[in-house]
Amino acid sequence: MRKFREKYIGNKDFYKMVLLVAIPIMIQNAITNFVSLLDNIMVGLVGTEQMSGVAIINQLMLVYNICIFGAVSGAGIFGAQFYGKGDHKGVRDAFRFKIVACGFLAVIWMLILGFANKPLIRLFLHEGGSTGDIEATLLYAKQYLQTVMPSMVPFALIQAYAQTLRETGETVLPMKAGIASVAVNLMFDYVLIFGAFGLPALGVRGAAAATVLARVVECIIVVLWTHARADKNHFIVGAYRDFKIPGTLVRQIIIKGTPLLLNETLWAGGMAVLMQCYSTRGLAVVAGFNISNTVANLFNVVFIALGSAISIIVGQQLGAGRLEEAVDTDRKMIVFSVFCCFVIGACMFAIAPFFPRIYNTTEEVRGLAKQFIRIASACMPLYGFMHATYFTLRSGGRTVITFLFDSVYIWVVDIPLAFVLTRFTGVPIVSIYLSCQLIEIIKCIIGYVMVKKKIWVNNMVMEQQ
């Protein structure tokens, strides 16, 4: 028993270290998702078509958001290890790469969503059941997208700055900026969606406008604070003087980061395709998943933050050459993440019957949402373990393996299963969703084997100058 505790359970100082990194990230992610939850609930109070239209656009925006996350994460692997090494110039070069990559991706995605929005939206619109009007849903989706698109630029900037701040040990400021963002979003959601203080009720356009304002405020706070504290944030000193990045580092980031960028993009695209498969069973399913995903995203911040903490803490230890310490830290953090997910999953399961009742929708939609929430809550420990193993592999730069482990798996296993079950069988949608979640057990086994083999124990910045 004592050996078990020493191997898998840390002391108070260990958990203090982990929580000092994880809790601010957790709070910021919770705040970000709370913004989406506010939009979702308030739009859901207006009607089912409005809620479904916003849900479809948010699914498309998720692909963009994850793509940006993948771009900053590729350079972030090096940023965390450079910081662990004490190389501020290396951190600055990694930051410059993030800015360039995020700017490029923002332009590309705005062009895609600007010119191809109608066919993309129609992929999710199918008859089925008695819930929803397809043409009305299409109209509301286009209205929301047109108004929310400007938020894509500040979002990209926020990710580039906030990720670098976290890599250098500053996790509180992004959290505070997120709190301000929520306050702005909450106030303007109410004012612009329903109309208040003499302003017109804008419905879905109001929800989108509130999101844009919230992102702009968050971006201003993060950027101004970073530059104002240049004595602490060494990476920002001269960061915009030029964008000269050492060719060796660019090649290394591209080699390590491209699989990660492709992985994140293909994963998010895969999630969108899965939702498209589910949507063939009707608009009620789209609305039900929208409610379920909204509450799940709020609870998911626990294992997402702990995964990010793994990439930061373990990455810094690898960069400092403390390889055995990194292995020990990683093992205990994985166990801690799974334990936390058991607790969070139980809480999520308990609220499943009550949360859908907030929405102004049909009993069919509420019933589906309740069952989807319960399935997601029961699978929470699986998600926690998968996420922790993914970030473990990524912290050591094994991005090709994470590409195979994550996005290739969803396209080769999850999507074919969902496609066949939704189009060629009469299996109920709830059973289909459960099957697609339980098949992730295979990924857990693969992740366990790869982490156990220690193929991720790798110092990538030892030779970087």
Image: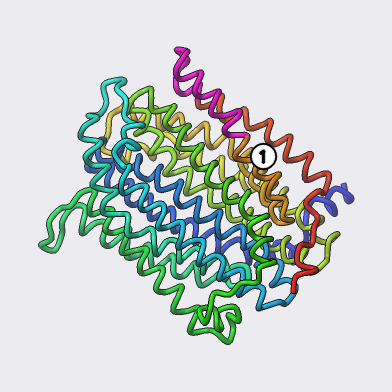
Residue at point 49% right, 81% down? 227
Q: Amino acid at mark 1?
A: Leu
Question: Extreme front residue here?
Answer: 247
Q: Which residue is mark 1?
A: 404
Question: Extreme left residue here?
Answer: 198
**Horizontal side, residue 68 vs residue 93: left or right:** left
Q: Nearer the viewer, residue 271 or 123?
A: 123
Query: Magenta stretch?
Result: 409-432
Q: Residue 419: x and y, percent?
A: 49, 23
Q: Residue 291: x and y, percent?
A: 38, 39
Q: Residue 409: x and y, percent?
A: 62, 34
SS type, badge 1: helix
Quarter occupied by the C terminus = bottom right
Q: Please say if 50 is above or below 426.
A: below
Question: Extreme right residue here?
Answer: 3
Q: Nearer the viewer, residue 336 or 413?
A: 413
Q: Residue 54: x and y, percent?
A: 31, 43
Q: Crowdedness of circle 1 by 10 Å Cα count: few (<14), some, many (20+)? A: some
- Coloring applied to the structure: rainbow
| Magenta residue check for 310 | no
Q: Please say if 213 is above or below 368.
A: below
- How many numbered tags mark residues here? 1
Residue at point 59% right, 83% down? 232
| Magenta residue check for 423 | yes
Residue at point 54% right, 84% down? 230
Residue at point 38% right, 28% down? 279
**Horizontal side, residue 269 vs residue 23: left or right:** left
The rendered magenta stretch, by its main secondary structure, is classed as helix
**Horizontal side, residue 105 vs residue 12: left or right:** left
